Image (spheres, helix red, strand yellow):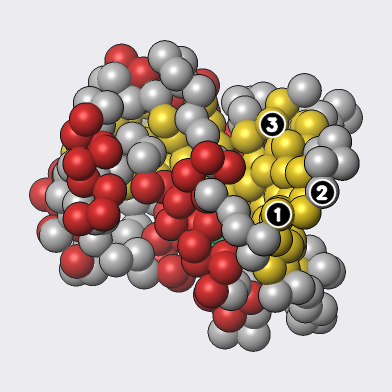
Amino acid sequence: MEMLLRPQSGPTSAVDLAAAYPWPPGRSWVRAMMVTTLDGAATGPDGLSGSISSAGDQQVFAETRRLADVVLVGAGTVRTERYQPLRAEPAALDERLSIGLAVAPRLVIVSASLQLPWTDPVFGESAVRPLIFTVGDCDTTALAVARKHAEVTVLPGSQVDPVAVLDHLTSLGLFRVVCEGGPRLLADLAKANVVDEADISIAPLIVGGGQKVTGSAMLKPNRFMLVHSIVDDGYLFNRYVTS
Ligand SMILES: NC(=O)c1ccc[n+]([C@@H]2O[C@H](COP(=O)([O-])OP(=O)(O)OC[C@H]3O[C@@H](n4cnc5c(N)ncnc54)[C@H](OP(=O)(O)O)[C@@H]3O)[C@@H](O)[C@H]2O)c1
């Protein structure tokens, strides 16, 4: 991998990903991690993000969650991407424990319907019990089912308020949040102006479909500063932070 640093300090041949994706100390921080194609698709022809990803993208993806407290996702992503259990990674365990993190990040899901693939091992075999945020008018039968498989927090209203989610996570001592999508949840976070960092992988692909509709754009977009671009196999791994 080659890193292009700003301002022009020139390319380096080896990238220390741990140094390139730091967490700020002592505060809540929301990192959005997504891969997109040149034509703005979130998925390839199979409807999954893996088919537009690369080995380098997987390395960056792994680094962005390695020392996270929380992996935050929308229910649509859980239904399609079928996450593997979040478990202690031996290579990360000592560092996690030495800085006071749990053995693995906690999976946190936002869902109004509570229609989730409950038999997937991510619910029964993750190191930390998943946590779901749902809405006050959720279906009570679905809520009872959900509580068998995860901890569920019911928030008022017919949509989950991202600010309330982050306040709740902070109250649990969970500050380092990596949101792995999908597009709908990311749009909600952006509209609530809570995205601190955007780690956006750009795949050198045009797939001619796979863009997700997330509603109308904000009148005042969130503005970010580019921190770095890493170039690998034609992919660009861009890290932006709020300006
Ligand atoms: N390219 C990438 O990096 C990437 C990353 C992740 C996912 N994806 C792809 O994106 C697709 C899924 O897209 P998506 O936009 O539907 O995913 P999503 O944001 O993960 O899921 C949308 C669902 O999340 C719940 N949700 C989100 N915000 C909510 C809120 N504020 N209040 C209540 N519920 C909320 C709702 O669940 P309920 O329907 O249960 O109420 C909603 O239908 C999949 O094809 C996946 O493979 C791509």
Q: Please say if the residues under marks 1 and 2 sit with CB atoms less than 8 Å apart.
A: yes
Distance between the alpha carbons at the discs numbered 3 and 2: 21 Å
In the displayed structure, 172 sits above or below 86; it is above
Type of residue at label 1?
A: Thr
Quarter of the picture containing the C terminus is top right
In the structure shown, which secondary structural element does the residue marked by tag 3 occupy? Answer: strand
Please name the amino acid that badge 2 sits on: Gly
Residue 10 image label: 2
In this view of the protein, which residue sits in the foreground, 1 or 152?
A: 1
Please say if the residues under marks 1 and 3 sit with CB atoms less than 8 Å apart. Answer: no
The residue carrying pointer 2 sits among few (fewer than 14), some (14 to 19) or many (20 or more) residues within 10 Å by Cα, namely few
Q: Of discs 3 and 2, which sits in the foreground?
A: 2
Q: Is mark 2 within 8 Å of ligand 1?
A: no
Q: Disc count in the image?
A: 3
In the image: residue 183, left or right of residue 138: right
Q: Circle 1 is placed at which residue position?
A: 12
Coordinates of residue 202 in the picture (x, y in percent): 73, 62
Left or right, residue 111 beside residue 227: left
